Amino acid sequence: MFILQEARRAVMKKILLVDDDRNVLHSFKRAFHSMHNEWQVVLSDNGKSALALIEADGSFDLVISDLRMHGLNGIDLFRKVEKTSPDTIRFFLTGATESSLLIEASSVSHRLISKPCEGEKLVALIRNSLLLREKLHNPEVRRKLCKLGVIPSLPKFYQEFCREIQTPDVSVARLGMIIEKDIGMTAKVLQLVNSAFFGFRKKVTNPLHAATLIGINGMRDIVLVAGFFNALGENDCPKTLDIEAIWQHSLSTANKAREIAAAEGLSQDDIDTSYTAGLLHDLGIIALAATNRADYEKVIELARDECIPLHLAEKRVFAVDHATVGGFILNLWGLPHAISEIVTFHCSPPGDPSAKATPLSIVYAADQLVARETQSPLEKGGETIY
């Protein structure tokens, strides 16, 4: 019996709840009671004591904090958590409504959740996030991905966005048209509009629509927040990985997916989902390459030497592929499930992808069609192996 209890305790997840309102803490403690065999829940009524717990232990799987607290506020707490315990999942639970504050909060947290929040909903959200985190078997990869706050943008799109936002007659439509061409900016604006910032019941899947909802002032706030958008540096990814080719492939896949979805008579929501998932389907390549440059060189070398698909080479090196990584990031950031699911399964969709026209089967088909028409992102010419 003792051995079984110890084994169970060893796999229990540790969750830290931080709020200076003790009534809130105890209400969630009660809501989490159903998970007492799986979760060890620790309460803290201020940021300073929460930080001390994290620094002393360092093994919390997930931290949920209020945004506004006396003393050490939620944003400063999460900045420190990110450095001290980078593989800890960070959620804000807040009733704040100021756009500038929420945009800054989004830059240091994985998700913003509105107060009040039903206990059952929060339990389901935590459980899902922890289950997805466990799929990242490589602890170093998991640590780097949980720390990752932004997918770097292609420099030309980032510079185009910065120029547009500074023009006297800046247009949200033009900003949206820039964003919908870029993987990193699309992921971040969809994270923002699908968070507590807006609190829409219906998930937003169209980046142009998302930009319109954020508005000009919100876009200016985004520029002021360091790291919310970020340009890919010259030395961020392996030299042997053609980043321009990845972006071109992703954009072409998105356009092809939208074209096929429209031709198949899908709803506008499904057309938007097909486009956005097509744009983001290889987001995991950028995430892995930018956070594990040296090891990704090994992936590229393995894929070339053995002439195997990139996702199989990634599994050999990282024990996970870019599809799983991309789906994990988008799910963690709270993007619509339909998009994160397509990204997760775009390399190997379950069932027969040709049986029925769905956003998943369409993105899969678009990806294959575009790959046959364009060069490999691993070299300037030659056979496509991704």
Image (cartoon, rainbow, N blue to C red):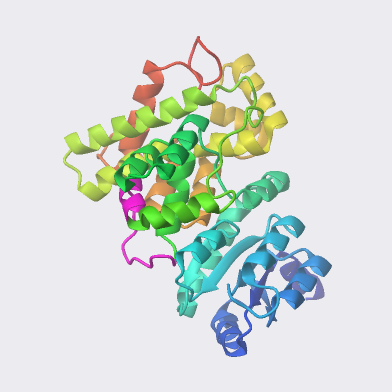
The percent position of residue 222, horizontal first and vertical second, equals 49, 53
**Quadrant assignment, res 198:** bottom left
| Residue 326 appears anywhere in the view | yes
Where 127 sits versus 216, above or below? below
Where 355 sits versus 327, above or below? above
Q: Is residue 360 left or right of residue 60?
A: left
Furthest residue toward top: 382
Where 147 sits versus 374, above or below? below
**Quadrant assignment, res 288:** top right
- Highlighted range, magenta: 196-212
Q: Is residue 13 left or right of residue 33?
A: right
Q: Nearer the viewer, residue 213 or 239?
A: 213
Residue at image point 55% right, 27% down? 310
The percent position of residue 148, horizontal first and vertical second, equals 62, 48
The percent position of residue 236, horizontal first and vertical second, equals 65, 32
In the image, residue 78 lies in the stretch drawn in magenta: no
For the stretch drawn in magenta, the main secondary structure is loop
Q: Is residue 125 left or right of residue 49?
A: left
